[in-house]
Amino acid sequence: MPELPEVETIKSQLQKLIIGKKIKAVDIFLPKMVKAPFRDFKQAVLGAKIKKVGRRAKVLIIELDNGWSLINHLKMTGQMIFSKRLVANSKQLKSKHTHIIYIFSDGSRLLHNDLRQFGWVKLIKTAAVKEFLEKDYGPEPLDKNFTLKKFQEISNKKPKARIKQFLMDQKNIAGIGNIYADEILFAAGINPLRKIGALSDKEIKKAYQAIGKILSLAVKLKGTSSQDYLDAFGHEGNFAKELKVYGREGEKCVKCKSEIKRLKIGGRSAHFCPACQRLTP
């Protein structure tokens, strides 16, 4: 968290907010978040204009007009908040969790916040960004080239993998994390413990369709604010009210009224309805 829908939301908003802006100054309050020598980082950033804002998987890419790009990973609790100015009593106000501030020549600024401090920003030559990211990530699930055939090809390579872990493995499919893996599997009616090789062609198709349906809706609703996520305006996303299983352990299933259960798979939680998502179909 943030996952694909949250980072896509921030990307789309920043495209309208910061492209063309010139970086006048940058304040760094937590040095470990910047994965580059300070001198090189500031030299590359100061005076540069924002050329483009992109996304790959859960990574936010800010391309500068001087051949450099800022690769931002928000990890678990990261936020990228745009502010025209620092306003008192606002979520856009610098707090103890604000670790980097990019100050633009028009007085506006971009705040990189992170409660748990796992996030980072890397300085990479724009020409090397694609190669840097491609080695770690599979296809984009909302890309037009991510077809059912492509999904079948990827899944056929991992017959022994449990479907929940398979969906969350970024080398298989980019951008899906804990929240959306749970919701995708509920929508498809597939138990998170099921192994890929045991799924029928019909179930594989249902999983593929659920990926597109759930992620598209989450993007439309600007993501899920189940914990610390805020969009670029400091607002919460609206997908939390659409959650059917994630974070609902002990509550009644919206379909069959059975109790939502939670279990651990590979060190991560999985939420599911044991009646709607049977282990043995």
Image (spheres, rainbow, N blue to C red):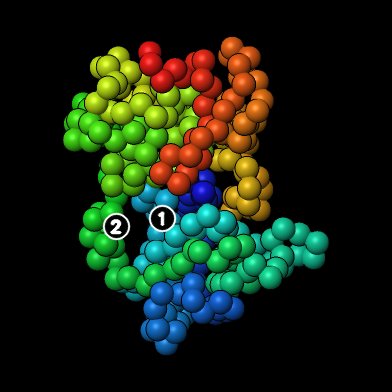
Q: Quadrant of residue 131?
A: bottom left
Horizontal and vertical percent for residue 18? 52, 61
Vertical position of residue 76 compared to residue 144: above or below: below
Q: Earlier in the sequence, mark 2 or mark 1?
A: 1
Crowd class of label 1 (few under 14; some 14 to 19; many from 20; radius 10 Å): many
Q: Mark 1 = which residue?
A: 59
Kindly identify the residue that appears in the image at 23 percent across and 31 percent down.
159
Type of amino acid under label 2: Leu
Looking at the image, do the residues carrying marks 2 and 1 touch, with CB atoms under 8 Å apart? Answer: yes
Left of 96 or right of it: where is 246? left
Residue ranking furthest to the bottom:
39
Horizontal and vertical percent for residue 180? 48, 36
Q: Mark 2 = which residue?
A: 133
Quadrant occupied by the C terminus: top left
Q: In this view of the protein, which residue sits in the foreground, 189 or 151?
A: 189
Kindly identify the residue that appears in the image at 28 percent across and 42 percent down.
172
Task: Give the secondary structure at mark 1.
Answer: strand
Left of 35 or right of it: where is 149? left
Res 79 label: none
Task: Give the secondary structure at mark 2.
Answer: helix
